[in-house]
Amino acid sequence: MKPSSKSLIPVLCAAALVLPAFSEVAEAPAKPAPAEAKPAAGIPMAPDMARSAKAFLALLKPEQLQKATYPMDADERLNWHFIPKPRNGIPFKDLDEAQKKAALELLHAALSDKGMAKAETIMSLEAVLAGIENNPKLRDAGLYCVTVFGTPGDSKGWAWRFEGHHISVNMTLGGGKVAITPTFMGSNPGEVRVEGPKKGTRALAGEEDKARQLAAALAEAGKPVVFDPKPPSEILTAAEREVKHLEAVGVQASDMTEAQELVLQQLLGEYIDRYRPEIAAAEWKEIRDAGLEKVRFGWAGGLKPGEAFYYRIQGPTFLIETANIQNNANHMHTTWRDFKGDFGRDLLAEHYKGHEE
């Protein structure tokens, strides 16, 4: 008899992709949350982020604060993207070393050591692109920006964003809880192939390798995992402010063998374990409570290494899209979305409703 999906979840963290540690302290494996019901929206993690945000803002000069801060209700809060373009907020190039350290500590209040390693590797690829394209003005890690919306710690709601080329981390907080989507990470090059100290670097290796492993196993078993031999040109939801369920494609977890479902969970772990353990545990619980057996994995494109591909993992509450199409399939985009909770929509609505009652 196939074990239940619940029994497989704790295995994930042990199978995580190993990347250079952000700090010398190893991150503890994420454990599933206790069995009691999780509140309808949000994760009880706000105090750490509020302290980190306050510490960062306290180091800024008045003219820097003008760039770095917006009202909570500003439309700018929803103005997210992952392409290289001018951004609002305070860029790293305008920060001194102490301020940069505080900005990274704010990011680390949301991301695990593993997530920080991915983020810092992605940022380091800007120097690689600057060399390849001879365009240091556009390809500059100093262009990553930090933006704070509202007043950190305000129970009515506040938010912050860390964003630049191929990274967008959006945290919304209210009532002592936090919503963590949309989140985007990309990698260009997907694998560094030019000579130099970064040669061989793959910032998002697990997101590709585990997915290829699962797609190949399902295809070999004769299951309809490939829904289109030609991948789309990009992730379908792009930088939309709100997303809806996409077409149900591929294979549902309930139709996978135990071994196949384990790989699916390991693949999910590449995304969920980017976050701090307490956030990851709450995300796992939400997926399990909504029905891990209902999660679907679908693939478009070639199954051989080096061939362009797109895949999506879709559950009742969330959507993951990943594409590796551009630059001869050496340019990855990955996104994590929540159907109700992007930018804290459900969290803030629930909080305000509670106050009205």
Image (cartoon, rainbow, N blue to C red):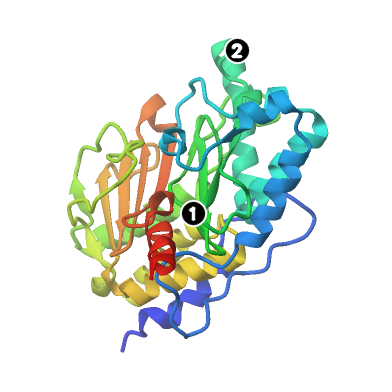
Local secondary structure at mark 2: loop
Residue that carries the numbered disc 2 in the rendered image: 137
In screen coordinates, is 61 left or right of 175? right
Q: Residues within 10 Å of mark 1 (few under 14, many from 20)?
A: many
- Residue placed most toward the observer, 114 or 304: 114
- Residue placed most toward the observer, 289 or 178: 178
Where's residue 153, x and y in %? Answer: 63, 55
Which residue is at the far top? Answer: 134
Dot placed on the residue nearer the N-terminal end, 1 or 2: 2
> Residue 82: which quarter of the image?
top left
Residue that carries the numbered disc 1 in the rendered image: 180
Q: Quadrant of the C terminus?
A: bottom left
Spatial CA distance of label 1 from label 2 is 31 Å
Look at discs 1 and 2 and give the one toward the viewer. Answer: 1
- Residue placed most toward the observer, 194 or 325: 325
Q: Residues within 10 Å of mark 2 (few under 14, many from 20)?
A: few
Residue at point 59% right, 54% down?
154
Where's residue 58, x and y in %? Answer: 76, 40
> Residue 97: which quarter of the image?
top right
Q: Quadrant of the N terminus?
A: bottom left
Question: Of the numbered discs in the image, which one, if any, rests on residue 89?
Answer: none
Label 1 is placed on what type of residue?
Ile
Q: Is residue 162 visible?
A: yes
Label 2 is placed on what type of residue?
Lys
In screen coordinates, is 238 left or right of 68? left
Where's residue 155, x and y in %? Answer: 56, 59
Where's residue 159, x and y in %? Answer: 54, 47
Local secondary structure at mark 1: loop
